[in-house]
Each structure stands twice: as C-alpha cells, then as structure tokens.
Image: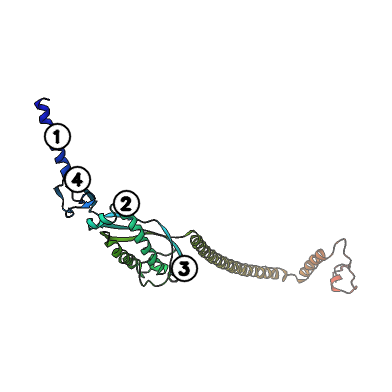
Amino acid sequence: MNKGVLIIIPVIVVLLLAFGGIYIVDETEQVVVTQFGKVVGEPKTDPGLYFKIPFIQHANYFPKNLQEWDGDPGQIPTLDKTFIWVDTFARWKVVDPLKFFQTVNNVTGALGRLDDIIDPAVRNLITSYELIETVRRTNRELDTFEIGVDVEDVKDKRQLGTVKFGREKITKGIMEQAQPKLAKFGIELVDVKIKRINYVDEVQKSVFGRMIAERKQIAEKFRSEGKGEARKIEGETEREMKRITSEAYKTAQEIMGKADAAATKTYANAYRLDADFYSFVKTLEIYRETLDEESSLILSTDAEFFKYLKGYTGK
C-alpha cells in the first residue's frame, strides 16, 4: 500500500464524520435531535449550522411555518333539523417540536389528530345553532332585488330570521373547543374557516322546487298584470273608437240634416210656383213606388189617391 492511499483513507473518514455530524436548520424548520430514539438536548428552533454525533444521533426535522388542514365534507344537521354539507379547512403550526415528536411524530400523524379533533368540534357547533347562524354573519339587509317586484315584498320574503350568533362566532367556538385538545401535541390551531356549505340532495331538491314555484308565481303575476294592462288598453281603444264613431255619425247627421233642409227648401221654392203640378208629380212618384205588375189595389172611386187614374178633364 503506497503513501497516497494511506492519506486518502483518513481524509475520506474525516469527511464522512464531518458530513454526518453537521446539519443545517433553515427559517422554516425546527429540529429535535435523538440518540437511539431518545431526545437529546433542546430542540433547535433558530436557523443556523449545528453539530451532532455522526451515525449515533439523528436530526428530526419539523415545519415551523403554517401548515394546511383540509377536512372532508360531511353531512351535519342544524338545530332546526336542516341537513347540510359542511366543508371546513384550518391553518396550524408546530409550536412545541418536542411534544410534537413525542406524540404524533410527524405531519401525517398530526393531520390524523386534527381530523379526530376538529371534525367533532365542527359537528358540535353546527348542530347547536340554526341554519341562518351558519350561513350569515350579520343581519345586514340583502342588497339585491328582482326586476318588476316590489322592494318591500322582496324584503318580506327574504327575512330569514335574526342572526344572534353568526358564522364567525361559530368558527371561533370551533377553535376554542379544538385548541386545548391540540396543545398537548405541541400544535397551535391558528385559524378555522367554513369553506363551503350546501344542502344535502333531498333538501336541495325541495329548495329548488320551492324556488321554481316562486318563480312560476312571479311569472304568473307578470302575466296577470300584462293581461290586465292589455284589457285596459283594449277598453280605452274601444271607448275611443266609439267616441270617434259617435262624433262622426253626429257630424254626418248634421250635414245630412242641413242638406235635407236645403233640398226641401229648394223643392218648396220650386213647387210653390205650381202647386197642382207638384201634387201631380208626387202622386206619380207614389204610383211608381207602390204599384207594379203583381200589385192589387182596391180603392173607392172618390178616393184622393185615385183621382189621377180617372179621366182628367182639367175641371
């Protein structure tokens, strides 16, 4: 064995020892050092370069920044017996890495504990209050309305109830129930929020049916008002037509009356010159209108109507 090999081997051994004995902690991490499974020293929570006994001691890394927990959606009944799907999420962090390591050991185990603690807290709080408390935060009036519907009617229909507790206080209550149970695992629950709320299928169908019925009722109201307005317009139109027709008939009758008066005056002036001739002409007109080939007329010989049928001597 030459001298080069004798030098290289110790260098390699020193490098391996140095590599195994140095570990780095960054800003988002914290470390618990264990030796044969037992914790050695204090947890390292500050970022920097640290040393341990190589191959004997082991550095266990845990996150120091916020972690995400996303719960499974579940069916929960409210206090007023309305079944809803509730989907929640939370943010948490490891504040005591020693307890964390000794109890749940890793992030996967911590998520299992969060499921076991937060889900029951959510169920307890949701079932303790009515649906409106979970849905709304305040009693603020709804600021939307339907076109063509009276605003006061809309407000009455939208009055779901009075909010006494509210959604934010429910989430706060969930945190207050869950946090003491998580503290023994070295976990701090930073925030819990309700991500989504929806009706279960059976209730959803009922709600949709009620919405459809309300829309049909509004549509029927519009149709009824439209028909009433149409009847009103038709009535006004018919009344106006009758007024115009009546005025036109009145004007026509006045013109005809004036024309008849003028004609009568003209006839009177014309026939005044010879009354016998006028009587003769009018009688002939009556003969023409009343007598034809199929008419039979029985008159006495001294009837006035018969005088022009007898021989006229001029005397």
Q: What's the distance in space between the residues labelled 4 and 2, CA to CA? A: 25 Å
Disc nearer the start of the sequence (2/3): 3
Q: Residue at x 17, y 42 (%)?
A: 20
Q: What's the distance in space between the residues labelled 3 and 4, CA to CA? A: 59 Å
Q: Quadrant of the C terminus?
A: bottom right
Q: Amino acid at mark 3?
A: Lys
Give x and y (percent) for residue 259.
Answer: 65, 67
Q: Which residue is mark 3?
A: 81
- Judging depth in this view, the residue of 232 and 101 nearest the camera is 101
| Labels 2 and 3 touching (C-beta < 8 A) | no
Q: Which residue is mark 2?
A: 108
Which numbered circle lies on residue 12? 1
| Labels 3 and 4 touching (C-beta < 8 A) | no
Q: Amino acid at mark 2?
A: Thr
Q: Tell us which disc is closer to us: 2 or 3.
A: 2
Q: Secondary structure at mark 3?
A: loop
Q: Which residue is mark 4?
A: 56
Taking the image as shown, residue 158 lies to the left or right of residue 100, namely: right
Q: Tell us which disc is closer to us: 3 or 4.
A: 4
- Judging depth in this view, the residue of 128 and 250 nearest the camera is 128
Q: Tell us which disc is closer to us: 4 or 2.
A: 4
**For residue 136, which quarter of the picture?**
bottom left
Which numbered circle lies on residue 156? none
Q: Residues within 10 Å of mark 1 (few under 14, many from 20)?
A: few
Q: Tell us which disc is closer to us: 1 or 2.
A: 1
